[in-house]
Image (cartoon, rainbow, N blue to C red):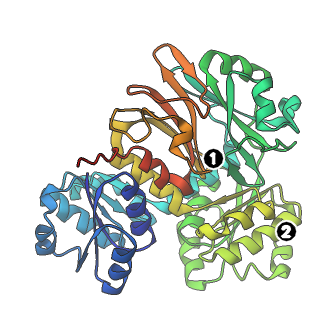
Amino acid sequence: MKVAIVGAGKLGVKVATALLGGDHYITVIDKNEAVLNRISQQMDVMTVAGNGKNIKLLENCGITSFDFLLASTDSDEKNIIIASFAKKLGCSKVIARVRDPEHMKQIDFIKETMNIDHVVNPDLSITMEIYKYLVEKYTLTNGIFSSGKVAMVQFNVKKYRKLSGLSMIEVRKVLPNMLIVAISRNGKIIIPHGQTIIEDNDTIYLIGEKFEIHEFHQKVHEKGKYTNLQKVMIVGGGKTGFYLADKLSEFGIAVKVIEKSKERCYYLSTHLDDVMILHGDATDTALLEEENIDEMDAFVTATGFDEENLLLALMAKQRGIEDVISKVSRQSYKNLIEKMGIDMALNPLDIITSTILRYVQGSKRIISSLLIQGQAEIMEIIASDEMKLTNVTLSELDLPDGVLIAAIHRGNRVIIPDGNTVILPDDKVTIFCLLSDIAEVESLFKPRRSFHI
């Protein structure tokens, strides 16, 4: 497919990198030539220097022949206009990144009027993941997810203690026809391998044949798992803080937002109902104590600075707050987060990239997909003969640590694979992957290269 990306910021580069794994033809448009030079040295993409709002530039790029255009500049208004122009000029599908709450209130009207096919909002997406965790405690429709003959159950090890202390190899003996595809531990989703040991407080994601999983679900299901959440403190009154405060307050939760900017505090206080807005610096422990931080059921850090978010989250966890969630954009902090023991760290870039990829691929390859704690994705695809993942053993695929072939649905059979398993054309394949490794998954769909001499 041909995809144009206007705006070579973090999102544009992330999406381009992921799509290249799937062997798409990518054109990146940006006004900054230095940024484009750096991109062209690192990636096999076409780069065009110029303003994406320029109709002549879009025409010269051959926009009529493109399957998709993503407008991801730093301005909502520019993105709306660029997407609208591209659609009018003949691009098949257009996507605009729109973040402003004022636009989101009338987004259906904007999409219809400007003829935009799809809108993505990183702040709203991360808000929904945090909300699901805090309010619904991340149940997969009461702990179970089904697709075709394959199902997955989520449960805490405490509900099935015989797994505690076992390695993955030993688990296969206890649950022979099932596979642990992921473990949620200390705020991080990990994909286990042979020697991974299950710990007492782990949350397990177990996959297998639908009937067997439903039977197992009866043993581990926790009834009435909805939250008794009453008080939440949010640090950072930016767009994520705004959306989350609005959503939680609508649910009936008492919310306090701490924001440094006086001007932003004024905006929040005039646009949010039943939310306490505090002007101050959250790194001031005296302020936090004055606002009864120890009485909070949850603490969310959503400033624009990863270091501040992590530092405050660690402090809140040490004070014994039950649910501590942090917004973290840098991939390099992944290992640090695991050691800190906060409950959940979310990367908005990973979440929105996954959303865009699923939209670009449509239903041709991916039958269904589901985000897991905003950090991983489970998807079901139909394998085809030209895909790299077919007609070779899984061990030959040399999958990265963050990608797991979880199950294969072939005819009336469900196969829990091992290294010797071969995926055949028309198999329904369930894949589990960390969002940080999503480009690796795209490469599995890539056609095999053939050389003729």
Q: Is residue 265 above or below residue 274?
A: below
* Kind of residue at badge 2: Asn
Residue 214 visible to an observer of this rendering: yes
Residue found farthest to the top: 412
Tag of residue 34: none
In the picture, measured across the screen, residue 14 lies left or right of residue 273, that is left
Please state which of the two labelled residues, at mark 1 or mark 2, is closer to the viewer: 1
Say which of 147 and 110 sits in front.
Answer: 147
* Kind of residue at badge 1: Lys
From the top left corner, tell me how far across and down residue 405 is, in percent.
Answer: 56, 37
Q: Residues within 10 Å of mark 2 (few under 14, many from 20)?
A: few
Say which of 71 and 165 sits in front.
Answer: 165
Residue drawn 58% across and 31% down?
420
Residue drawn 63% across and 48% down?
373
Q: From the image, tell me which residue sits under label 1.
A: 132
From the top left corner, tell me how far across and down residue 371 is, in percent.
Answer: 55, 45
